[in-house]
Image: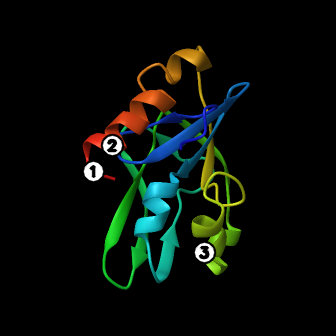
Amino acid sequence: MVPGNLRYTKTHEWALLEGDVVTVGITKFAADQLTDITYIELPSVGKKTIAGSACGNIETVKAVSDLYSPVGGEVCAVNSGLTADAAPLTADPYGTGWLFKLRVTGNAADALSGLLTPGAYQNQLESEGH
C-alpha cells in the first residue's frame, strides 16, 4: 500500500505539501529497486526546478536513475545526510529518506493537481505488474 497523504509521479517520486513547501522523495517501490547505492546527487539549495524535469540522480553499481521534480519551485532544503549514508533512502523512503524540499510559488495546492492520487498510483503499480 502507498501512503494516503501523499501525491505521486509516474516516475515514482512522492510529494507532501505543507504550507508552501513540498517535501520530495522516492516511493518504496523505487527504493526497493535500488541496491548497492554508490552516489546520490541532490539539487542544491536555491536551484529552481520545473515540474517533470530531472534535478539529480541516484547511482547504484548497476545503473544511474534520474530524480525528477514533481512540481516547480525553488529548492529550500536537501537531505544532505543521504550523501554520506544512503541507508535511510531504502529503509524509510517516506520518512527519514526524504530527498529535498521545494518552496512553490503561487497556489501551492494547484502545484500538486497534476500528480497522481494514492489510488491512481496504486493502480499504476498494479497495471505494471508490481
* Marks 3 and 2, how far apart at CA: 27 Å
Give 26 or 129, whichever is nearer the viewer. 129
> Mark 3: few, some, or many residues within 10 Å (few <14, many ≥20)?
some
The amino acid type, in three-letter code, at marker 2 is Glu
Q: Nearer the viewer, mark 3 or mark 2?
A: 2
Nearer-N-terminus badge (1/3): 3
For the question of whether residue 7 can be seen, the reply is: yes
- At a point 31% along the width and 76% down the height, the residue shown is 63
Give 98 or 53, whichever is nearer the viewer. 98
Q: Position of residue 43 (x, y in %)?
A: 53, 56
Label 1: which secondary element? loop
Q: Position of residue 88 (x, y in %)?
A: 66, 68
- At a point 49% along the width and 78% down the height, the residue shown is 39
Label 2: which secondary element? helix
Pointers 1 and 3 in contact (CB under 8 A)? no
For the question of whether residue 116 can be seen, the reply is: no
Where does label 2 land, which residue?
126
Label 3: which secondary element? loop
Where does label 3 land, which residue?
86
The amino acid type, in three-letter code, at marker 3 is Ala
- At a point 49% along the width and 63% down the height, the residue shown is 31
Left or right of residue 54, residue 7 in this image = right
Q: Position of residue 92 (x, y in %)?
A: 66, 61
> Mark 1: few, some, or many residues within 10 Å (few <14, many ≥20)?
few
* Marks 1 and 2, how far apart at CA: 5 Å
46 up-or-down from 6: above or below:
below
The disc at residue 79 is none
The amino acid type, in three-letter code, at marker 1 is Gly
* Marks 1 and 3, how far apart at CA: 27 Å
